[in-house]
Structure formats: C-alpha cells, structure tokens
Amino acid sequence: MAGLSTGNPTRWRCYWAELEGNGTISWADALLTPDGFAEAQKARAFYETLREQQRMPHFETYYSSPLRRCIQTANATFATLQTPEQHPFAPTIKEGFREDISIHTCDRRSKRSELETLVPWWRFEAGFAEDDELWEGDRGRGESPEHQLARSKAVLDDVFTHDDATWISVTSHSGQIAALLKALNHRPFSLSTGQIIPVLVEAELIPPQPRPSYPAFTPEATCNEPPVTSLARQGCVCPSSPTSSAPSPRVYM
C-alpha cells in the first residue's frame, strides 16, 4: 500500500519510510493487511493438513516478534487450530525475534500497553519494556547486520537455555528469519511473505566465547524532502543536504 501511494523505491527508502504515514494511511508498526490475513489463513490450512494427514507433532511453545503485523499473523495462523490441552496456543512475545531495526517507522514497535490491548491473553518475556528502547530511527541510526546477527544468536541462546520444549514455533519476519538461520549455521534460504520453514536444531552447551566488537547502530542517510535519486555508492541524492551527518555509531564489545 505504501509503495503505491508514495512512488518509486528510492522515494520510499530515502524519505517516506521515515515518516509516520502519508496523511491517508499509517505504516508506523503497521497492522496486517487483508492480503496478510489471507496468507496467514493459507498457513493455518497448511498446518491443519500436516497434522491431520502426516501426524505432524503439535508445537509445545510459541514465540512471536513484538511487531503488530507479526502478532496478527501468528494469531490468525494458530489461534483456531485444535491443540492438546497440555500445549495450548499461549504465545510469548520476545524482542529478539523482531525484524531488523532500520530507521523506518514500520520497524518501531508499539508500546507494551498497546500490545496488551491488542492481544490481552498473550505473554511477554521478562523485562519487556513499555517503550521501544531499541529503535533509533529518530536519531537517524539503524541496526547493523552484525548487531542483528548477534541479537539473533542471543535470542536463540535464551530460548534453548530456558525452554525445554522439543517442538517450538517462531513467527517472525523474512529479514529476521534469514538472520536466525545464519546464526544457526543453516544454509541461506529466502522466504516470501507468509511462508514457513522447518528447522532441525541440535542445541548443546559450550563454554562462553569471546565476542568481537562491532558497530551496533550506524547512521543512515535520508532526505528532508522526496529525493532526486539514489546511487549505489552514495545512497540518497537529496534536492538539498541529507539529514545524515550525524551521530557516531554505537559500538558493542
């Protein structure tokens, strides 16, 4: 919807994506679209078929990204499926499963209290904050690939350390799923919207490993008005100066 109303991808990436919306629609932590609900229903039917015809085990634990479109996807996929009494659909929202944290407002999550209103029967991981403490788009900084990979490994370590379930469901986003697969040393696998991938994981405890330093959130160039164009090496080409002179990258050790 946003692409149709804002023009080409350059205009979207360099200007429109950093706004709350365009006065007609809002894309800040956007809700799931009708097409998204249709895709979730296809996923639901797929799981139902697997369980009825191929004896697929029921999930024992469910996790979801905190972004609203993902929460609604998980709910539309699993909430009406028959589940055993000992393993109900009772998802936990975890920050670590969110999409890469770009400067775009669609990657800024809603307040915890707003999410509690959206799905009052869902659980939140311990320490889940009221406000989004990770998004730095208002300071012109987006998450680096190195930080996303480290975040993906950390959330997987947390799950495998504290959850003794065998069959686990994670509802996340295409970019974050790619990072999770990389953290698992899985071969690259690109998923389209609404698709599913099964992953067999052997988890074992190893001694803590030294962590290299890496840039966590780095400045991203944008424009104060719709851009002229975007160049591969230069990025956004603005009619006036770009907004990105900016803050130094935050470094994690």
Image: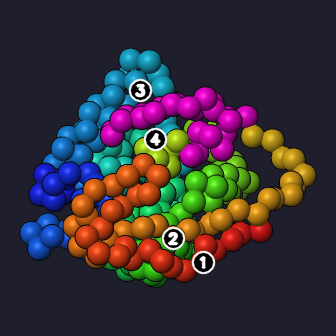
* Residue farthest front in this picture: 240
Mark identifier at residue 84: 4
> For the residues carrying marks 3 and 1, which lies nearer the camera in this image?
1
| Residue beneath the point at 56% across and 32% down | 188
> For the residues carrying marks 2 and 4, which lies nearer the camera in this image?
2
Q: Earlier in the sequence, mark 2 or mark 4?
A: 4
Q: Earlier in the sequence, mark 2 or mark 3?
A: 3
**Mark 2 near mark 1, Cβ–Cβ under 8 Å?**
yes
Q: CA distance from mark 4 to mark 3?
A: 12 Å
Q: Amino acid at mark 2?
A: Pro
Q: Amino acid at mark 1?
A: Ser
> For the residues carrying marks 2 and 3, which lies nearer the camera in this image?
2
Magenta range? 179-202
- The percent position of residue 137, horizontal first and vertical second, equals 43, 73
Determine the secondary structure under disc 1: loop
Q: Earlier in the sequence, mark 3 or mark 1?
A: 3
Pointer 1: what residue? 248
Pointer 3: what residue? 51
Q: Which quadrant is the C terminus positioned in?
A: bottom right
Q: Amino acid at mark 3?
A: Arg
Pointer 2: what residue? 219
| Residue beneath the point at 45% across and 33% down | 190
Q: CA distance from mark 4 to mark 1?
A: 51 Å
Verify whether residue 3 appears in magenta: no
Q: Nearer the viewer, residue 86 or 110?
A: 110
Q: Amino acid at mark 4?
A: Pro
- The percent position of residue 51, horizontal first and vertical second, equals 41, 26
Q: Nearer the viewer, residue 234 or 141?
A: 234
Mark identifier at residue 111: none
Q: Is residue 166 above or below residue 219?
A: above
| Residue beneath the point at 46% across and 47% down | 175
The quarter of the picture where residue 103 lies is bottom left
